[in-house]
Image (tube, rainbow, N blue to C red):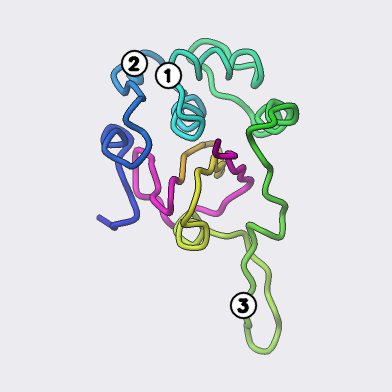
Amino acid sequence: MSNQFIHIKEALIAKGLSELSIAPFKYQSSDCSVKALAIVKNIPYQDALGYASDNFKRRFNKGVTLTNITKGFLNDNSIITLNGREIKTFYNNQGKMVERSMTVGTFAKTYNKGKYFVVVRRHALAVVDGVIIDYSEGLRRPIQKAWRAIED
């Protein structure tokens, strides 16, 4: 296991997450966005469920779409959207510059300060101070969109 990954159940030992209650995470399925939201905003799981229901149009035991997450964060002043260029990488491939979506592993190394809500294909996760907090260590998944939480 990488030193830049923490299993979601071990997230309580990560810096700044001690107020979260991990036990209720078992209550619903398809709740990766709720877990990531609870970690990034440092709020209890139940509050994150309410936020996701109100802002992401999340229903009981159902996931949310990237479109609904994006719309849900529009009026939240505690979250800033990273623009497309900030989550892209560039490399030289036989003399041509190629642009690709940043992977979760590269994102964690690049954005090693702060709390981020990250969406990959059909899944959401949290990155806190360069540590990936998720149920699996999928470092090579390309990022679709990311948001940074504004610290108080």
The region drawn magenta spans 128-152
Read off the residue under disc 3.
91
Mark before the other along the chain sequence, 3 or 1:
1
Q: Is residue 91 left or right of residue 133?
A: right
Residue 34, image x and y in percent?
49, 24
Read off the residue under disc 1.
45
Please tell me whether residue 126 is drawn above or below residue 84 in the rendered image: above
Q: Amino acid at mark 1?
A: Tyr
Secondary structure category for the residue under label 1: helix
CA neighbours of label 1 inside 10 A, class few (<14), some (14 to 19), many (20+): many
**Quadrant of the rendered image containing residue 146:** top right
Secondary structure category for the residue under label 2: helix
> Nearest the camera: 139 or 130?
130
Mark 3 or 1: in front is 1
Residue at the image position 29 percent from the left and 33 percent from the top? 12
Compute the Cα span from label 3 to label 1.
40 Å
Residue at the image position 62 percent from the left and 59 percent from the top? 101
Read off the residue under disc 2.
24
> Nearest the camera: 142 or 8?
8
